[in-house]
Every structure is written in structure tokens, then in C-alpha cells.
Image: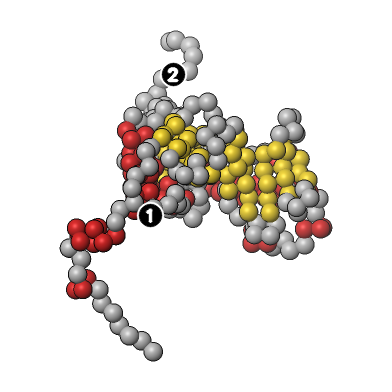
Amino acid sequence: MSEGSPRIRTANKFKPPFALNKFPKSLGLNIGGALVYILATKGRPDLEGNEWEEIFAKSIGADWKNSVLGLDDVVLGSCAWGAKTVKGKISSKRVRLISGRNSLEYSYKVKNLETFTTNEIGKMVLSIWNKRFNDASKEYKHLRTVVMVKSQDLLEVLVFEFLTVGYKPENYNWKWNGRGVLEGFDTTTNQHKFSWQPTGTQFTIIETVPKQGLIIKIKKPKKLNREKVLKELGFNEKWVTVTRVG
């Protein structure tokens, strides 16, 4: 009988659909086409977060959930993605990602923050995130976040992903900045990692942009003419019902 760990058939049963940042070849073209369509129909560089979720889902043949949890907006097999968009430069090294509300009043019934130290508040903020992460981890074997960094004119975007993880509260120190925002810093590097706003309870995670990813550039299309589109569709008065009220 040989020594060592035996091989079992279930060891690689839950593989991710592709390696991290090794996107399918069709992804760039699919995203580029979606951006051209948005500019041609809207006439302005307006891409909302839920639109990005749907675009990414369709581009990889996944299901779009538009999840309230925010960690499983897109699902493909045993893998789930939270999808984020942020305006910025394609050359950005770090990005701020809005990652939930993390209301201490809702989750912990906390109304008076002055009775807690900054690290105690930060621990509660991270505990809310960790609860969401743990719940999602029970349902999916692989959790990732996919990010689109978009230029102001939407003619150039950067797409990358990273593993979604939980955070150990003891690894971060928290302090208030001059604007009344609580900021969390890595205890080893002193690098700014989190921001939390008591007003609006917005939780932001600052992520380092990986070296791998996709840069997608498109040509600016002309805006579609509304009258021509309606004519092409065969639009007429029978398509509209108007009811007067009041």
C-alpha cells in the first residue's frame, strides 16, 4: 500500500469556468458591442451598475440575478460574481468599490457610535460584510468580483476580476478622517483599505488593480435617429393607448 494522500474523484468536481482573469476570447468583443449599442441608443456615456451585470452575464453565458446580496449578481455553475463599475483612468493602480451599506443601526441596533471605539465600530462594519461573504460561500464554491473601470466617454474600459474574500477585523486599524468618514488601514502596511460613512452607511473597499485583465477600446458610434428607428419598427398610433385620468 503506497503512502500519501489518495486521489478521489470529487477533488476537481467544482472547477471554476475559467482561470482568474483568463476570460473567454469572446468576452472583449461582446462587451465592446454592448458599449457601442449603449452609446448609439442613449447618445451619452451612461452605463449603470445593473447594465454592467447583465452585459457580463450575457458575455460569458451566465445567469444574471441582479442580487440584493451583491456578491452573486452573476452565476455560472458553481461560480458567482459581484459586478462593479467605477469611473476612472484605465491606468489606475487602485480603485474604490462601493460594497454595500453595512448599517450598524439595522444589523446591530446601534444608534450612538460615541459609545464605541473606532476599532469596535470597524469590527462591526467588517462583520456585516463577512456575514454576507459566508452566506454566499455556502452556496457557491467560487466567489469573484468583476470590475469595469470606465473612461468618462465610455470609449475605453478596463475589465478585471479578483477573488471575493472575508476580512479579519484584527488586521485593520480604524480612524475618523476630517470629513466624518471612518477609514480602515492594514496593520502591516498601513495601506488604506476601507471607508465607511455613517450618514448613508456606505461601505467602500479599496482594491489593487491586478496586472492581468482586458482593455477594450471602441469607436464612437453615431446616435440612432429616433424617428428612423420607430419607422423601421413599423410604429403607429395603434401601439399606444392613452387614458385620461382625473
Residue nearest the viewer, comparing 67 with 53: 53
Res. 193 image quadrant: top right
Q: Amino acid at mark 1?
A: Lys
Q: Earlier in the sequence, mark 2 or mark 1?
A: 2
Q: Position of residue 72 (x, y in %)?
A: 46, 46
Using a 10 Å C-alpha cutoff, classify the residue at mark 2 as few (fewer than 14 neighbours), some (14 to 19) or many (20 or more). few
Q: Position of residue 235 (x, y in %)?
A: 20, 66
Vertical position of residue 123 compared to residue 243: above or below: above
Residue position for label 1: 42
**How many labels, in total?**
2
Q: Is residue 188 visible?
A: yes
Vertical position of residue 65 compared to residue 24: above or below: below
Is label 1 in a helix, a strand or a loop?
helix
Question: With 61 as the anchor, is 165 left or right in this view?
Answer: right
Q: Residue at x 63, y 54 (%)?
A: 202
Residue position for label 2: 6
Residue at the bottom extreme of this rendering? 246
Vertical position of residue 113 compared to residue 192: above or below: below
Q: Residue at x 77, y 58 (%)?
A: 113
Q: Position of residue 73 (x, y in %)?
A: 44, 48
Is label 2 in a helix, a strand or a loop?
loop
Q: Amino acid at mark 2?
A: Pro
Question: With 103 as the anchor, is 60 left or right in this view?
Answer: left
